Image: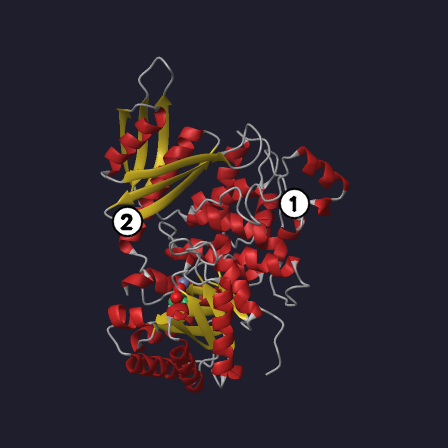
């Protein structure tokens, strides 16, 4: 097989990324991210794990029916029922892929699967054969591959390629590998699996030691031609390899990495922002490529150099990742036509009713904020459309606060269409709001984290609040935005409570619990 110079980007934001504590998404949100990932140019999108829940199945099915260019993969255990369900969910995709996996390390086989190596090998082969009876696009993953016996790995890979697997994925499931060691392992597998030239070799790294990107790049150097990544590196525990880091490393250092990808790098920043907003997973300011400080130069000596020649301290241009792209400004006088066509350009396909809802919210916001930016519009759509069919919603909020009064909040909520209202005090205005919301909703969640930041620049910016709630062992993230930060706090709390309700119905199944 000719050496392939394009690196296949397999995005698993919607599957492994969703396993981040609290990052679960509803179907509309998943669809929105999926259409954005397609625009970004990912080759394969792992849309979910259909056997995990009915919600997951339906979301994968909706994505498969919607996407036009990206391949859509469904994750399935090495099990006939999982594979049948997986196929059922993706069969209408333009190019569906079944991704089946089983663990191959001593530890996992003995303690998790209670199976010997021969049984695991047999199960892997049977599953791949079964998957190949539906499609010739079959991926096989050896879970905990980096801690597996090298020769056993090669035996399994050879057998599953003979059984019909066209992509072979080597995961560092627990983020244990070290770059040099991982490079050696990928090379070993490549040279000691006799039929490896009949499949694409892939790597899938976790970031427990902060080495996911390094390991992935080492994997490429060793011959891997598919990388499994997520936006902002979200995922189980410390996360997965981040798409933006790998793509920009390849893009920035072509002398070192003579490979291409199909990614439109100018869509990296908007995609990162969207995933953060929808999942509620904040991006740390110093995060590589997409962090708020990634292109900020504070030191005078740096600023001077940048002004004379940006290349002095900037190895990537902000516009390359879509950071300085013109963010169209709308305002009070913008009509529905301008708003609708901008929403379409942003990648949303909203119905007439949904556009009407957003336009109403837009007008309301424009009365209070002069310039409405993309971030504002995303927040309006998120609140008004993507999360509309929820249990709790805010009707009214009034707060009395100051340094000489007892903070008191009066709140009216809608609970499944039924109005309820009440008032309570607190030690501050937000405490008062949360106390009354918790009483009205009869919920007992614990507030684990509360953060607030400005959505855009300027003193009239919307406040963006993120909360992390826990109830009965389930963790959910909630987000809310409004020029009034108390209202934003209430919206975030209500959003978090809705997420908890959703998660009770649609639990995210963790691989480690299988
Ligand atoms: O980390 C892992 O091993 C996985 C596999 C299912 C590919 O996510
Ligand atoms: Zn994983």
- Which residue is rendered at x = 41% and y = 55% of the image? 208
Q: How is the image coloured?
A: secondary structure
**Is the C terminus in the top left, top right, bottom left or bottom right quadrant?**
bottom left
Ligand 2: quadrant of the figure: bottom left
- Is residue 68 visible in the rendered image? The answer is no
Position of residue 174 relative to residue 360, above or below, is below
Left or right, residue 406 beside residue 462: left
Left or right, residue 185 beside residue 433: right
Left or right, residue 506 beside residue 297: left
**Is the N terminus in the top left, top right, bottom left or bottom right quadrant?**
bottom right
Distance of mark 2 from mark 1, alpha carbons? Answer: 38 Å
| Mark 2 beta carbon near ligand 2 (under 8 Å) | no
Do residues under tags 2 and 1 come within 8 Å of each other at their CB atoms? no
Mark 2, residue position: 474
- Which residue of the protein is positioned furthest toward the top in this rendering? 404
Which one is nearer the viewer's eye here, 320 or 145? 145
Which one is nearer the viewer's eye here, 429 or 28? 429
Residue 290: x and y, percent?
Answer: 56, 48
Mark 1, residue position: 324
Mark 2 Cα-neighbour bin, 10 Å: few <14, some 14–19, many ≥20: some
């Amino acid at each position: 097989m000719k050496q392939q110079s394009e690196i296949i980007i397999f995005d698993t934001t919607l599957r492994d990324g969703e396993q981040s504590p609290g990052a679960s998404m509803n179907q509309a949100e998943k669809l929105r991210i999926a259409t954005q990932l397609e625009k970004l140019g990912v080759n394969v999108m792992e849309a979910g794990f259909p056997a995990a829940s009915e919600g997951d199945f339906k979301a994968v099915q909706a994505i498969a029916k919607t996407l036009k260019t990206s391949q859509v993969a469904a994750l399935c255990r090495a099990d006939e029922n999982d594979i049948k369900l997986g196929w059922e969910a993706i069969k209408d995709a333009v190019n569906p892929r079944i991704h089946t996996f089983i663990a191959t390390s001593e530890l996992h086989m003995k303690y998790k699967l209670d199976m010997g190596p021969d049984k695991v090998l047999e199960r892997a082969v049977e599953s791949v054969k079964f998957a190949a009876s539906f499609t010739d696009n079959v991926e096989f993953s050896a879970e905990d591959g980096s801690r597996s016996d090298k020769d056993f790995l090669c035996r399994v890979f050879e057998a599953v390629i003979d059984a019909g697997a066209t992509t072979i994925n080597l995961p560092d499931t627990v983020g244990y590998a070290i770059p040099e060691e991982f490079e050696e392992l990928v090379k070993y597998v490549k040279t000691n699996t006799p039929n490896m030239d009949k499949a694409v070799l892939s790597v899938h790294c976790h970031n427990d030691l902060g080495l996911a990107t390094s390991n992935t790049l080492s994997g490429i150097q060793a011959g891997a031609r598919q990388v499994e990544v997520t936006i902002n590196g979200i995922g189980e525990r410390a996360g997965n390899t981040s798409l933006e880091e790998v793509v920009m490393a390849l893009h920035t250092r072509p002398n070192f990495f003579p490979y291409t990808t199909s990614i439109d790098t100018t869509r990296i920043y908007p995609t990162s922002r969207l995933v953060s907003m929808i999942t509620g997973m904040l991006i740390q300011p110093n995060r590589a490529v997409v962090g708020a400080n990634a292109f900020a130069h504070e030191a005078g000596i740096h600023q001077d150099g940048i002004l004379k020649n940006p290349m002095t301290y900037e190895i990537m241009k902000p516009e390359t990742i879509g950071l300085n792209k013109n963010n169209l400004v709308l305002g009070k006088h913008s009509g529905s036509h301008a708003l609708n066509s901008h929403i379409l350009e942003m990648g949303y396909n909203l119905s007439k009713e949904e556009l009407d809802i957003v336009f109403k919210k837009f007008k309301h916001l424009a009365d209070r904020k002069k310039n409405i930016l993309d971030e504002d519009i995303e927040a309006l759509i998120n609140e008004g459309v993507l999360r509309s069919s929820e249990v709790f919603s805010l009707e009214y909020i009034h707060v009395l606060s100051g340094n000489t009064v007892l903070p008191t909040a009066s709140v009216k909520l809608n609970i499944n269409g039924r109005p309820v209202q009440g008032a309570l005090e607190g030690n501050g205005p937000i405490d008062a709001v949360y106390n009354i919301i918790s009483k009205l909703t009869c919920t007992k969640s614990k507030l684990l984290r509360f953060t607030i930041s400005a959505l855009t620049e300027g003193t009239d910016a919307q406040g963006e609040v993120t909360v992390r709630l826990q109830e009965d062992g389930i963790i959910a993230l909630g987000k809310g935005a409004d020029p009034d930060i108390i209202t934003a706090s209430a919206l975030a709390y209500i959003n978090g409570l809705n997420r908890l309700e959703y998660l009770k119905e649609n639990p995210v199944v963790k691989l480690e619990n299988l």
